[in-house]
Image: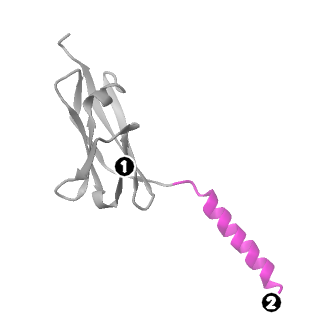
Amino acid sequence: MTRRFPIVLVLAALAVTAFAAAPPTVMDIYLKLSPDALVLGGPGVWVTAHTDIAFSSVDGTSVALEGVEAVSVFADNRGQLVAKFRQADIEAIVSPPDATLTLTGLTVDGVRFAGTDTIRVMESKQK
């Protein structure tokens, strides 16, 4: 019995090391931003993020678009996460001709998720 004890300790240590060394996983989600063309200083109020992750599985306080916190998070008619951001906040971090933006967050189980979409960015013709 004493011969097996060191082997069990070594195996347990290897298992702990393997789990500790595993890189954090990020769940890839679908993201569609609306509008898909943003006019800087334009008439819009919101940038809306539509996803394919279940709203019930998301920690709504963790949802951000390029670090900008969501003003509102809710479920669409299919139960999937929708998040709204102030257009002025998004305009402050983008520039023409386009911007690739990543939505990030956590599930209620602590799993990171992320989705990316590219939108056109245009200067307003009115000055």
Q: Report which residue position mark 1 lands on.
A: 61
Element class at badge 1 = strand
Q: Report which residue position mark 2 lands on.
A: 1
Q: Which amino acid does label 2 sit on?
A: Met
Q: Magenta span has 62?
A: no
Element class at badge 2 = loop
> Residue 64 at x, y = what percent?
37, 42
Q: Which residues, given as a range, are shown in magenta? A: 1-24
Q: Distance between the residues labelled 1 and 2?
A: 52 Å
Q: Is residue 111 left or right of residue 123?
A: right
Q: Which of 123 and 83 is in front in this view?
A: 83
Bin the neighbour count of mark 2 within 10 Å (Cα to Cα): few under 14, some 14-19, many 20 and up: few
Tell me the chief SS of the magenta region: helix
Precedes in sequence: disc 1 or disc 2: 2
> Residue 123 at x, y = what percent?
25, 17
Q: Residue at x 31, y 35 (%)?
A: 118
In the rendered view of the protein, which quadrant contains the N terminus? bottom right
**Whether residue 4 is situated above or below residue 63 in the rendered picture:** below
Bin the neighbour count of mark 1 within 10 Å (Cα to Cα): few under 14, some 14-19, many 20 and up: few
> Residue 96 at x, y = what percent?
31, 21
Q: Which residue is drawn at 18% across and 13% down?
A: 125
Query: What residue occupies the far top of the structure in this picture?
Result: 127
Q: Residue at x 21, y 34 (%)?
A: 35
Q: Residue at x 34, y 60 (%)?
A: 57
> Residue 112 at x, y = what percent?
44, 53
In the rendered view of the protein, which quadrant contains the C terminus? top left
Question: How many discs mark residues in the rendered view?
Answer: 2
Q: Nearer the viewer, residue 49 or 60?
A: 60
Q: In front: mark 1 or mark 2?
A: 1
Q: In this view, does 62 lie to the left or right of 51?
A: right
Q: Which amino acid does label 1 sit on?
A: Thr
